[in-house]
Amino acid sequence: MFKNPAYKLPFKIQIFLGCLLVAMIPLLFSGVFVVKIFEASLSRQSVTATKKQLEDARDQIDQLFSSCESACYELAWDSTIYRTMLDNSSIDVQKDLYLSLYQSVQKTYSSISFSLYDAGGFLRFTTESNNQISEYLPRDWGVLKKASQTREMAYYWTDPYLNTIPGLVLQAACSLENPQGARTGYLVLDFTHDNLSRILYSNYSDRDTFIILDHLGNPVYCTKKEYGPEEISRIITQARSGTDTGRFLYDSISSPKYGYTILLQKGSQISASGIKTMKTVSIAIALFCLWLCLMVSLALSRSFSLPVSNLDRAMKKVRDGDLTIHLTTNRTDELGRLIESFNRMTRDLKSNLETAIRQQKDLNETSLKLYQTQLNPHFLYNTLDTIKWNAKINQNPQIPVLAENLAQILRSSISSSSFITLRQELETIKSYIEIQKIRFTERFVYEEEIPYQLEDCLVPKMILQPLVENSILHGLEDYSHGYICIYGRSTEKDEKQVMLIAVTDNGRGMSQEIIDWINSPNPRNRTGHLGLYNVIQILKLYYGQQYGLHAELNPEGGTTVTLILPIERG
């Protein structure tokens, strides 16, 4: 068998190491797990916040484009536009046109400039007051070419490094047609860097950077105007690869409707230096806890090992035969109770030893008397045998029967074995019945109905005789046609095989008081029923409280008393 090497160490060292390990292992694991879980939680929160930030930015830009489209379509159907294109010399017509343009700007909740170009690409009217609008837009390329090819809103992302208009990011245009379907001009919207920055202002902090890519993946907008092509290219590369540098978190989202992509470089919630500081603090706390655990473990090991060592030395003296040892303690905990139990044990051992010596002396005297009394049964057998043969000589047939059956019952009752087979017990009952038939001539009939499978089962000797005697002497008193039957069967009780042996008669039956007394869990001794009481006690002492006797009145008269005992074979 494997022996733990730790058991070879002194008890004090075992307690010290055990306390230290129990305290330190959870401390170390919890410290590492807390830091890792904290980092993972921050990372998960950052990822969630980044996605939410990107979704909000995309929704706001999509909402801007959608409101601009609605305003443009509304202007396209405005009759003022057609009149202005035909005659722009009228002051009233111009006022109406500017009013319509400014109302459209207000509907977009932004400062985007609305400009009206004629079919040749020349600027006619604009809401821009800073003169940063092209006076002419070519029709064979750019936004006007895209607008001339569709009836929908056309979008044209400009190159921020080649753009002639400072800050221009995106142009949107729709074609204007008269009722006959002829193109009369174009409505052009200019989206500048400042326009988009005002839209995204609520979605980023100073440590965050938004970059917008057009449908071809080219950068057209960056919240940080000071970033050059190299810095923007680095952010795009890391955002596409999903790299987490520790200082920044990168993610992107696309607009399915308008085809652009937004990249976000988000600053970490806690910097690397902050995480390092947290780890340093955790290590310092762990070292302090280690020192505290060492001190507590030493104190505990001394507190537990000292009384255990004293108890160990005392037990060695008891093993050597010294029962006068006595330990003193002022503890009231388990160790104190253990020492008190040891003192009580030594007192009991000393008392028991003295009692055992005295009982051994009494036993020797009893054994001597027992050897002397063993001569009596032999004398009784010889006397009964003399009576039997003397009765046969004098031709008295009943006396030999009485003597022979009485000898059989006596031999069974004083045998050395406490258990006999059911077959042997029934043979003893037959001897008893033969004696009683001489006394009660022709007054009862006796039968047995025992399955042969149960005949080899063990039962306490003389266990049935008190039941049969009770049926004959009390149940069949004053009856001239009595009937007694012993029958048995096996059954299952509490998942155990048990044997039921019943003694039934057709006599006058027991009173309800006696039946309740037999069927009670722990019946007390009653005058006149010593035999039944002894049977109940024997069954419960041998087999347990769940076994015993059960009595009931027969519907046709008489009583049935059943023995309940487990099936055992020798």
Image (cartoon, rainbow, N blue to C red):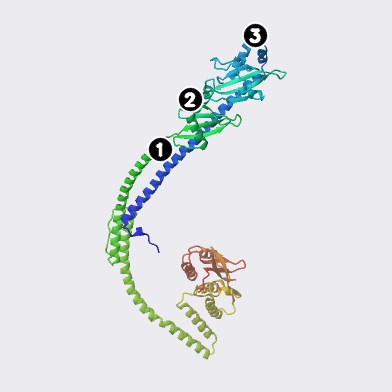
Q: Is residue 98 left or right of residue 283?
A: right
**Label 3: which secondary element:** loop
Q: Earlier in the sequence, mark 3 or mark 2?
A: 3
The answer to whether marks 2 and 1 mark residues whose Cβ atoms lie closer than 8 Å is no
Residue 193 place in picture, x, y as percent: 52, 23
Q: Which mark is residue 31?
A: none
Disc 3: which residue? 90
The answer for how far apart the CA atoms under marks 1 and 3 are is 70 Å
Q: Earlier in the sequence, mark 2 or mark 1?
A: 2
Query: 471 or 66: which is nearer to us?
Result: 66
The answer for how far apart the CA atoms under marks 3 and 2 are is 43 Å
Residue 463 visible to the viewer: no
Residue 46 place in picture, x, y as percent: 48, 35
- Corner quadrant of residue 81: top right
The answer for how far apart the CA atoms under marks 2 and 1 are is 31 Å
Q: Nearer the viewer, mark 3 or mark 2?
A: 2
Tell me the amino acid under the disc marked 2. Answer: Lys
Residue 485 place in picture, x, y as percent: 58, 73
Disc 1: which residue? 275
Q: Residues within 10 Å of mark 2 (few under 14, many from 20)?
A: few
Disc 2: which residue? 225
Tell me the amino acid under the disc marked 3. Answer: Ser
**Label 2: which secondary element:** loop
